[in-house]
Image (spheres, grey):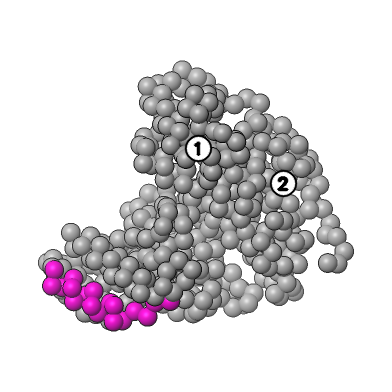
Amino acid sequence: MSEPVPRHTIRVEVNGEALTRAVEPRRHLVDFLREDCGLKGSHLGCEHGVCGACTVRLDGEIVRGCLVLAVQADGGRVETVETRQPSARLRALQDAFVARNALQCGYCTPGMLMAALELVERAPEADREQVRTWIAGNYCRCTGYHAIVDAVCDVLAAQRRGAFEKLPQEAA
Amino acid sequence: MKAPSFDYVRAASPAQVFELLREHGDAARVLAGGQTLIATLNMRLSEPALLIDIGGLDALRGIALEGNTLRIGALTTHAAIEASPLVARHAPLLAQAAPHIAHRAIRNRGTFGGSLAYADPAAEWPACVLALDATLVLGGAEGERRVAAHDFFTGLFTTALAPGELLLACELPVQADGERQVFDELARRHGDYAIAGLAARARLQGGRLHELRLAFLGIDDRPRRAQRTEQALQGRAIDDATLAMALQTLQAELQPYGDLTSGPDTKRHLAGVLLQRALRRLAA
């Protein structure tokens, strides 16, 4: 390996806070969050896009944090489970996961929550089968998945009953 | 694991990309959605010196109807195609195929052009563009050129793209009156690489199939049209006897590759299953 590669300065909004950091180009987004921002809530499993433990939100959409370079997020907006102002839907999912015993070791949980949040927001009519298909990209080795699906379905049902309706748009 | 060290530049224009590719040759890689490239780098299967990020080239993004042609920019994500009303209306084959591509988080970043340029034999888009007789628009320092899908996929992970060229867009003929398009794929779990898949289209007239296209994925080193089976079904109505004939013709025609999941006989069998399902749906 020859001389070290120069670092790139990037500006990223992380959970609502504007951060400036100098990073190596090879630094992927989750390592950036964990090592450069001190946010350990996002996890790494396979580091090649298969397990989903690294799922975070970039510019409003879920992505594989291990398959996005931090330099690609320059000027972007990242949201993780550690967001200081969790939306009502995220809180509901977190509460449902607890109520349904949808986590044991918790390693897959942040990725599951971020993936489930996008489902609740974008596919409100999803049935149990569609929930299963949606989270098929997030592996869990502890729970056997059913409790996770139950928790997500509970939140979808609450949403259909109007649980998130009277809230200002930002908190929803 | 962690990627090896590389330098990075965010390209401001296609011209800059062509210049950088000319200067660096094989030591540079183009970064689009990164859903294949970054995984490859994380596994250290490749060690380029420079990544050229084309994500800022907005002119390569978008879906537009131009007369009888649907033009899809190379940087259009799988998710954008999945959600597009234009695609649902004019190229429903793509709308059917999109949900089979990996998982949502990957579809939010991965690009149409990236999939076509990488030409994984198990990928969905190469078979789709082959079935639709699409045209690929390539660009380089010398200018643009067009290549028919039929001539684009030349071997395992190999396309007609010359060194220093970028895939800019794909032009697809819009679905005609009376035309049907069906896509199906078989995988062990949703989102896994396909064991076998089929992109099919035909024009239905008087209950008979015309201009049938059957493009298989996952069974060869590139998407493969079953042309003898297509010809055998030309002008035919679909009944049990025709299905049996088609199946026999297909089994004789295909020379499937085995892979990590399945041997050639399994692939041949599954191709036959997909064929029967597709023909029934086309003729329904």
Which mark lies nearer to you, 2 or 1?
Answer: 1
What label does residue A31 carry, if any?
2
Magenta-colored span = B240-257
**Closer to the camera in the image, B277 or A9:** B277
**Relative to B192, is A80 above or below?**
above
* Displayed quadrant of residue B271: bottom left
Mark 1 residue element? loop
Amino acid type, mark 2: Asp
Q: Residue placed at 45% from the left, 33% from the top?
A: A147
Q: Amino acid at mark 1?
A: Thr
The picture places residue A109, in percent across and down from the top left corner, at 57, 36
Which of pointers 2 and 1 lies earlier in the amino acid sequence? 2
Q: How many marks overall?
A: 2
- Check if residue B243 falls in the magenta segment: yes
**Residue A44 percent location from the top left of the image:** 65, 46
Residue on which disc 1 sits: A143
> Where is residue B66 drawn, in percent x and y?
40, 61
Seen from this angle, which residue lies furthest top?
Answer: A166
Instruction: Tell me the CA gap for discs 2 and 1.
Output: 26 Å
Judged by its main secondary structure, the magenta piece is helix
| Chain letter of the residue beneath label 2 in the structure image | A
Q: Is disc 2 in the same subunit as disc 1?
A: yes
Mark identifier at residue B8? none
Residue A161 falls in which quadrant of the image?
top left
